[in-house]
Structures are given as C-alpha cells and as structure tokens.
Image (cartoon, rainbow, N blue to C red):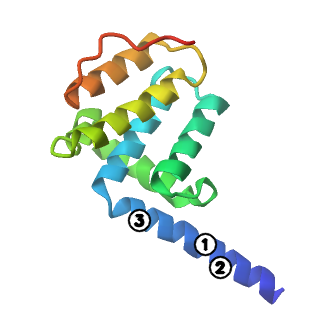
Amino acid sequence: MVFAWLEALKTRLEKERVARMVANDPALTAELLLLFRVILADGEVTQRELNIFKRICRESFGLDPEAMDGVYAYLHDFAYETSAAQAAAVFADLPQERRQALLDHMIAIAQADKEIDEREERFVVRIGDLLGFDITEIHKGD
C-alpha cells in the first residue's frame, strides 16, 4: 500500500514537473499550441496525428507523452488567450533552424493521416508565412 502511494506521488510530481517545464518555456508552449492547432484544423483528431505529436514531444523536447496531463490542461487554458499569430510571433527572433523545425513538425502532423485537408494546409501555409517561409502548397502524400 505504501509503495502504491509512493508510485502515485512520483507520477503526480513528474506530471507537474513536465507542466512547469512547458509553462516556463514560451517557445515550447507556443510550438505545442501550434501543433495542437494543426491536429484540430480539419475538425477531426486521428490516432496517427496524436502518435506523431507524442513522438515529437518525446524525441524533440524530451517530454514523456504519458506525463503530459498537466501540459494539456495548461495549453487548453493558454489557447483561449493566444492566437496562432501570437504563438508564431514567439519564433520571430529565433534562428531559422528552430523555425524550420517547427514548420517540419507541423507538416508531419498534417501529413500523418495521409489526407491533408485544405484547412490544415491553409493553417500551415499561414504559419509558415509568419515564420518567414514561402510555402505555396504542402506535398499531399507519398
């Protein structure tokens, strides 16, 4: 019983640590918010999109997808106060490589279900423009 309680406490503290880490990093917060908006752009959330998002969180940011409940709650609240343009503006002074990584992540999510909806494409193209990239069309599948 004590071990179960300790394990639950450890899990809760890890989730809080991850949420604090995201909340204290404006660029990471902005990127996660933009990635979520790509997922939601076509009005349908697919498991493939979520899997790509989790892979990006794990591989690019070192975030454990299983410890992100607090992050999701934080982003949900933050999203009401932040437009996509405001989130993209966080990247204005960051190096081109960092802006390119964000755009690559957005495109990976848009392509995840092999069907890029025109709303997803418009959103990614608009954010690409705000990031200083000229994108006219996203390659639609392999």
State the mark number for residue 9.
2
In percent of the image, x 59 and y 61: which residue is there? 67
- What is the three-letter code of the residue carrying label 2? Leu
Q: Pointer 3: what residue?
A: 21
Please state the horizontal and vertical placement of residue 12, each as a whole percent of the image: 60, 72
- What is the three-letter code of the residue carrying label 1? Arg
Labels 3 & 1 near each other (Cβ < 8 A): no
In percent of the image, x 21 and y 29: which residue is there? 130
Please state the horizontal and vertical placement of residue 44, each as a whole percent of the image: 57, 24
Graded by Cα atoms within 10 Å as few (under 14), some (14 to 19) or many (20 or more), the crowding at tag 3 reads some
Distance (Cα) linking label 3 and label 1: 14 Å
- Report which quarter residue 125 is drawn in: top left
In the displayed structure, does residue 1 sit left or right of residue 17?
A: right
Labels 1 & 2 near each other (Cβ < 8 A): yes
Is 72 in front, or is 14?
14
Secondary structure state at the residue bearing disc 1: helix
**Figure quadrant of the C terminus:** top right
Is 2 in front, or is 115?
115
Q: Pointer 1: what residue?
A: 12
Q: Residue furthest left?
A: 93
Q: Residue furthest right?
A: 1
Labels 2 & 3 near each other (Cβ < 8 A): no
State the mark number for residue 136.
none
In percent of the image, x 17 and y 41: which residue is there? 92
Secondary structure state at the residue bearing disc 3: helix
- Report which quarter residue 133 is drawn in: top left
Would residue 37 be visible to someone looking at this image? Answer: no
Please state the horizontal and vertical placement of residue 35, each as a whole percent of the image: 43, 37
In the displayed structure, does residue 111 sit left or right of residue 89?
A: right
Distance (Cα) linking label 2 and label 3: 18 Å
In the displayed structure, does residue 39 sit left or right of residue 85?
A: right
